[in-house]
Amino acid sequence: MTDAAAGSGSPAAAGQGAPAAGVAGPGAPAAEPRQRGGRPRWSEFTLESLIRVLGFSTVGFVLLIFAFLMREGLPVFFQLPAAELLGNLWYPTFGKFGSLPLIFGSVLVTLVAVLIALPLGVATAVFIREAAPGWAREILKPLIEVLAGIPSVVLGFFGMTTVAPLVRHWLGVPTGLTAFTGALVLAYMSLPTIISVAEDALDAVPRGYRDAGLAMGATRWQTTWRVVVPAGRSGVIIAAMLGMGRAIGETMAVMMVTGNAARLPFGLGALFRPVRTMTATIAAEMGEVARGSTHYHALFGIGIVLFVITFLINLAAARAIFRRRRKGGLR
């Protein structure tokens, strides 16, 4: 009898006298779990810290690059008057450092390249995503990625030996090394980036958008151009900006096919005459310039201008995307 009472009262006594295993008492501090999902918390903390450091380091590297450009390029803005820096003559041997021919040459070649590559890139992305059969899509996408890996010097050599003679023969110009030739080469180099980004943007459009367009009586192509493409315009804008950044930052190919004539590209025939870009100028002259000279600082000043132009292009694209997102126009 005593044993039965003791046996039946043991659980109650245990429940009243001591807390259950794993449960802290009223006055005891809560035990911190040591694992989450089978992994020690210190390992998770280490990974999060590493990712955070890598993310901040990316911003830090950009700031360091900008600081280096400012240190090496700012002296030229104090050594030379603004009127000379914004002149139309670039002859460093004679002390002429007018940057307008280089700036306008870069802008002309880049804009023409984007005007050529953007429609072709978006149309190709639409075909791959909306019209091509599955087997063709699996072939075209890797092929486009491979085209992006061709070295720029190879494309520049191809443009100099093949595209330039064709331009000179077909258009009847004195030389085939022109701004138009450079724009053609840059358009080809920008196409893989534009196609890949635009295709990913179209692929991210929900299937319900297409079904809704077809349910309203629209044809397949009407649904594509009036529903799918507008819904993915944020990615198309990003593709255009990345393509423009790829074009304006290219050096070797442009230096080989544009003729490298530092002249203002004005007039009706400016597109079919030689020009010189900012990147080609830096690449061609930096190896022969004396460190610390006015010419040296002028080249870094051109680098600052190029950095600022690229930054403004990306800022304008981000602002346009954010504005449309606030209006509900973009995904």
Image (cartoon, grey):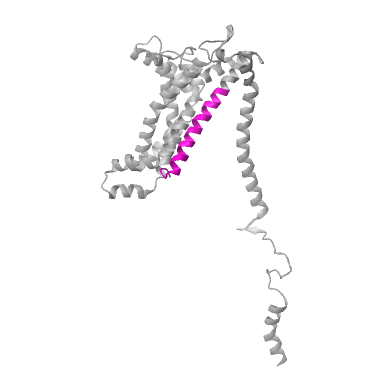
Q: Residue at x 48, y 17 (%)?
A: 256
Does residue 315 belong to the magenta stretch?
yes
Residue lying at 40% horizontally and 39% vertically, measured from the top left: 233
| Quarter-of-image position of residue 183 | top left
Q: Quadrant of residue 83?
A: top right
Of residue 320 and residue 18, the one placed in the foreground of this image is: 320
Decide which of 308, 60 is in the foreground and name it. Answer: 308
| Residue 6 visible within the image | yes
Picture quadrant where residue 201 is located = top left
Magenta span dominant secondary structure: helix
Q: Residue at x 43, y 17 (%)?
A: 179
User: The C terminus is located in which quarter?
Assistant: top left
**The N terminus is located in which quarter?**
bottom right
Image height check: is 259 above or below 125? above
Residue 289 visible to an observer of this rendering: no
* Nearer the observer, 297 or 284: 297
Q: Is residue 183 left or right of residue 18?
A: left
Residue 164 is covered by the magenta coloring = no
Query: What segment carries the magenta color?
Result: 304-331
| Whether residue 275 is situated above or below residue 232 in the rendered picture | above
Q: Relative to 156, is 28 above or below? A: below
Q: Is residue 108 left or right of residue 79?
A: left
Q: Residue furthest right?
A: 27
Q: Position of residue 247 (x, y in %)?
A: 47, 26
